[in-house]
Image (spheres, helix red, strand yellow):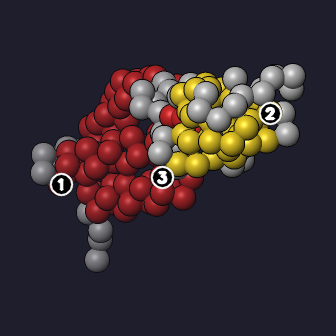
Amino acid sequence: MEIDAWVWWLIGAAALGIGLVITAMPELGMLAVGAVAAAVVAGILGGDAVVQVVSFVVVSTALIAVVRPIANRHRAQRPQLATGIEALKGKQAVVLERVDASGGRIKLAGEVWSARSLDTDRAYEVGQEVDVVDIEGATAIVM
């Protein structure tokens, strides 16, 4: 019993897909799509081995040439919406307990936070508005 060429291409695509999942290398996914294209050429169009290999190479190369630069651009961009502690930096807060270099309490984004002054010589009194410049652990650094 002989196995058709398109089955071998699908086995190769599955192996590349498994490699993609294990290594998280998107290039393996693009090669897997090329293998599926070669399986289509072998199974549906009935192309010979040279046409199958050429379709694999063309589709894989085209995907790597087009998709990879787009993916790299997206990976390099910072998210437009800040979340977590990044979203709190730059916000204003109200002093609940005197804040100085050794500590205090503020109300920030509806929550009570421990805080300390960025400037060791500066103290903020109850009711004053302060700006959050950084978050260190569970402590807001204010000025």
Q: Label 2 neighbourhood size at 10 Å, few (<14), some (14-19), many (20+)?
A: many
Which residue corresponds to the image point at 20% horizontal and 45% vertical from the top-left? 41
Which tag, 3 or 2, sits closer to the chain's start? Answer: 3
User: Is any part of residue 29 visible from this angle?
Assistant: yes
Which residue corresponds to the image point at 28% horizontal and 77% vertical from the top-left? 1
User: Is any part of residue 71 visible from this angle?
Assistant: no
Q: Secondary structure at mark 2?
A: strand
Q: What residue type is disc 2 on?
A: Asp
User: Pointer 3: what residue?
Assistant: 20
User: Pointer 1: what residue?
Assistant: 43
In depth, the one of 12 and 117 nearer the eye is 117
Q: Secondary structure at mark 3?
A: helix
Which tag, 2 or 1, sits closer to the chain's start? Answer: 1
Residue 38 position in % (x across, y down) = 28, 45
Q: What residue type is disc 1 on?
A: Gly
Which residue corresponds to the image point at 38% horizontal and 60% vertical from the top-left? 14
Q: Which mark is residue 100?
A: 2
In depth, the one of 93 and 70 nearer the eye is 93
Q: Quote the CA–CA distance across marks 2 and 1.
A: 75 Å
Which tag, 3 or 1, sits closer to the chain's start? Answer: 3
Which residue corresponds to the image point at 48% horizontal and 52% vertical from the top-left? 20
Task: Describe residue 30's horizontal placement relative to residue 24 as left or right.
Answer: left
